[in-house]
Image: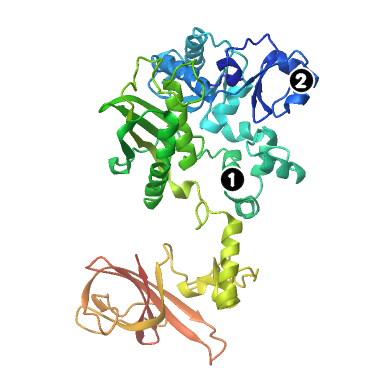
Amino acid sequence: MWCPDWPVVAAGLPATVPAAVLAGGEVLACSPAARAAGVRRGMRRRDAQARCPELRLVDRAPQVEAHRFDEVLEALEELTPGVAPIRPGLCALRVPPRYYGGERETAAVLAERVVELGVWDVRCGIADGVFAAEHAARRALTQDVWIVPPGGSADFVGELGIDVVEDVALADLLRRLGVRTLGSFARLAPGDVRTRFGDTGALLHRLARGEDPQPVARRQAPPDLVTGTAFEPPLETSEAAVFSLRTTAEQCVETLAQHGLVVTAVRIEVDSDGTTVQARTWRHPAWFDAPALLDRLRWQLAAAGPAGGRGDGHGVPGAGRGDEYAQGIGAVRFVPEETSSVGEHADTLFGAGHDAQVEGGAARVQALVGPEAVQVLRPQGGRSPGDQVHAAPWGERVPVARPAERPWPGQIPAPAPATVFASPSQAAVAGAEGQRVLVTARGAVSAVPSRFRVSAAEPWQQVAAWAGPWPVDERWWDEASARRVARFQVVGVDGRAWLLVLDGDTWFTEARYD
């Protein structure tokens, strides 16, 4: 659900009056009457006044915006518990559509409730993901809904212009490169996008393909991931609380990262006088970092403050809401409610790090230890696990000699072993009666493997399961380099799995599965 021009609505400026809200000397939002006169978001104050001399200008008041939108959220929560604010003026909802008779009927009920609060312009969008639903709402008419059919998010998002990208610098760069729509951007190769545009471009590329990284349902985060801070004595101002929780927010993000997770929905709980007096669940279009957590905390505390008053965020919150924080802010907790794997968001080994920083660090290491000492590994074709990895110095584009997509007879099936030994140790495999297990020229096994040991230092153990052989006859035309081997996958009774190779009549341990 989207309420357009929310800073103007929160400031109490009528839509029929040419008005604009300023932030940093630029127009942040303007009324429909001001837009009709030529005022646009991002204009400087002087340019906006030149377009519309009667324009009424007010400075932005984030605490007032959060306070007014909190009233909208409370009204919506009377109809459905699944309300997650994204930012003041925009929220995501999960409502069973059949409860109200259908999706369009549900949107009408929710919009009517918001209109009762005096917010006339409210629009709804329904889609598979949050990103597509937000832009569907932006296409809807006032007090109406735009519904994207199930599975149609990719086609819908692909029609959007590149101007919808919030990162102005990235949008300008894509426009200069000839990319006009998200659909044309989605047709680029994912690897090339990450190399050229970094993590921000990679996330936008996934959204452009309709792959919203934040599905509706997520698993609950374990309770030990909750982070918080208690204040003794209690803090009297919201800004002091936000400033004091910077380290806590960073710790919350870092703790999740250690578990390979990012948080997409977080509940912020605020205690006063030993009691939880306010709790709000916030949702993010992508995932929360520490600054985003602090922003939501600031909005939540500002929403609990008086709608009027000082307006600087430094008063005691709750003065206009039943004195919820009359005893001060005693504790704040960040409770991750919905998490996802960091692998769903970061496509590279380096996580959220910027590619330029990685390249700079690798270049410095090369200057210290030599260019050949820093290697980049890429998959290539081959029959043995060691042959399937191509190493090249960092920064050099050495072509892969053996393409992986070509057929390689004798190649072991997936999954690949986790550890390939540089120097295979000599092993042994025996049958039930102690005889050596060999492979004939036709690929037949002389006896069923019953016992094995992976090296001379390891004890014998029983075979729990085995597969193979995968015979390979390499370079048979050259007597000097010809090699005939057969590989087996063997699992011992201790649960460990190994890749053993029979070279001639000698067994070796080539790799280990983890």
Q: Is residue 183 left or right of residue 366?
A: right
The residue where tag 2 is placed is: 49
Residue in the picture at 35% in, 17% down: 323
Percent coordinates x, y for residue 139 in the rendering: 63, 22
Can you say whether 129 is above or below 396 in the image? above
Is residue 217 or residue 322 the one in the foreground? 322
Is residue 53 or residue 191 the one in the foreground? 53
Residue in the picture at 61% in, 13% down: 142
Is residue 97 or residue 503 the one in the foreground? 97
The residue where tag 1 is placed is: 200
Please identify the quarter of the rendering in which residue 7 is found.
top right
Percent coordinates x, y for residue 149 in the rendering: 55, 26
Percent coordinates x, y for residue 348 in the rendering: 52, 55
Question: Which quarter of the figure is the C terminus placed in?
Answer: bottom left
Q: Residue furthest bottom?
A: 480
Q: Is residue 188 left or right of residue 422?
A: right
Q: Amino acid at mark 1?
A: Thr
| Residue 218 appears in the picture as rendered | yes
Q: Amino acid at mark 2?
A: Gln
